[in-house]
Amino acid sequence: MKIAVIGTGYVGLVSGTCFAEWGNEVICVDKNVEKIMQLSKGRIPIYEPGLETLVARNQKAGRLSFTTNLSEAVRNVDVVLIAVGTPPRAGHGDADLSFVHMAAKEIAHALSGPAVVVVKSTVPVGTCDAVQKIIDAVRPAGDVSVASNPEFLREGSAIDDFLFPDRVVIGVEDERTEAVMAALYEPFSDGSTPVVMTKRRSAELIKYASNAFLATKIMFINELADLCERVGTDVSELALGVGLDHRIGRAFLNAGPGYGGSCFPKDTLALLRTAQDFGVTLRIVEETVSSNEARKRKMALKVVDAIGGDVDGLTIAVLGLTFKPDTDDMRDAPSVSLIETLQRFGATVRAHDPVGMSNASRILENVAFFEDPYECVRDADAIVVVTEWESIRQLDLVRLKSLVRSSNLIDLRNAFARGAARAAGFSVSSIGRPS
Ligand code: UGA
């Protein structure tokens, strides 16, 4: 198949590359000239394990190319994927769809024959209907149909999530489009991966419901972690005991400083906005959002309490800055509010992250960044672990202890074995474990 992908963010770049890997001829389009120039040279603008190799392989095979020229790219294709951003509108909480609408109009003008336009961006219910209207207004011939095909990939494991997903969700309104979409996902036609073929609105809502459920699961375990601390039990054992029930599942029951990233915070708010528009109250999602906000604030107080009630004039070393490991993404990372609050309380902050420091330095002010985690903790009054990178888990606790000024280790991800940290001489404060 000939495929054009509009937008080379996470979803667009990973989907385009993976469709090429399946043998399709893919052209990726972005308005950002510099980005397209770099991609054409095989340079990947995001940190995503395995992506660079996959892009290079498919570029070399002549199946994957990059351009800024949307009109030329879409002219003769069978399928156009819209994978542009849907950022939250300032002060509203709902998704800004102007990029999606703009892309739809441009595509409609440029297409030379029948095609299926697939919306991959995360969009509120009814967006595909609106995109269909935009296209129909430009092309009354009715030879271009719109499908919804939300993406469920996670940053850090995006390629595996795309190539080996739990399921594929497709929303269509007619049989011709259904056939094109089935052909697009031909590798799964052997039944190895469930393909949920449904209507466009259902597919759109499935995406938001999935993210809201996962966010809720995280906040459930986080609240239980607070209770564990009080009653003297360990939240990891609780998560295991509860999660082994296959109706519940162990995944996404890791307690921590709250969820961040470009998806859960934005998508939960957008879902609430949709519910409001339709006169429905989603109380559980509302509580999830406010519980997460409260938790992020609470983390700074947890650090202050662990250190003895006052951080004014103290130096705190933060290990791990990105919203989760294996990404350089700092969007809505819990580390940001934590660091800013500690600074307001008078602390000096030093920080280390294996990959995210360049992005972090654009957001955080007055933070000293260190490539070397051991240098980062030198003479600090406390170490705070915010992101559970494997390289951070593997740090030598005895060496860390020898470098710090005092023994406070606040482990907000339970990244270190508590016994080992105590044996190294740390006084450890962790999540969901009695102190
Ligand atoms: C999330 C979903 O997991 C993907 O399925 C979805 O496609 C994606 O959003 C999206 O909508 O594009 P992502 O934001 O990359 O993926 O990251 P997750 O791995 O889901 O983690 C999100 C946040 O939850 C992180 O801050 C992470 O630290 C936190 N988390 C996750 C926990 O605190 N505990 C857990 O057990 C799991």
Image (tube, grey):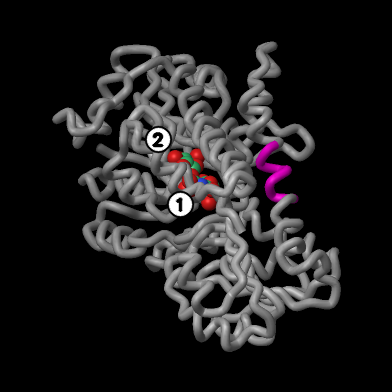
The mark closer to the camera, 2 or 1, is 1
Residue receiving disc 1: 155
> In the image, residue 116 lies at what x, y percent?
37, 26
Q: Which residue is at the front of the view, 60 or 277?
A: 277
Q: Residue furthest left?
A: 190
> In the image, residue 287 lies at what x, y percent?
67, 30
Which residue type does callout 1 highlight?
A: Glu
As for residue 293 lying within the magenta part, the answer is: yes
Q: Which residue is at 59% across, 86% downward?
A: 375
Residue receiving disc 2: 80
Where the N terminus falls, by quadrant? top left
- Tell me: is circle 1 under 8 Å from ligand 1: yes
> In the image, residue 18 lies at what x, y percent?
30, 48
Looking at the image, residue 96 sits to the left or right of residue 187; the answer is right
Looking at the image, residue 155 sits to the left or right of residue 219; the answer is left
Q: Which residue is at 50% across, 36% downward?
A: 214
Which of the 4 image quarters holds residue 196?
top left
* Prevailing SS of the magenta stretch: helix
Q: Which residue is at the front of the view, 99 or 350?
A: 350
Mark carried by residue 278:
none
Q: Which residues are magenta?
A: 291-297
State the SS at label 2: strand
Which residue type does callout 2 highlight?
A: Val
Looking at the image, residue 162 sits to the left or right of residue 29; the answer is left
Q: Which residue is at the front of the view, 425 or 300?
A: 425
Q: Which residue is at 51% across, 86% downward?
A: 399
**Counting other residues with Cα less than 10 Å from the Cα at mark 1, is it few (<14), some (14-19), or many (20 or more)?**
many
Distance between the Cα atoms at labels 2 and 1? 23 Å
As for residue 405 lying within the magenta part, the answer is: no
> In the image, residue 82 lies at what x, y percent?
47, 36
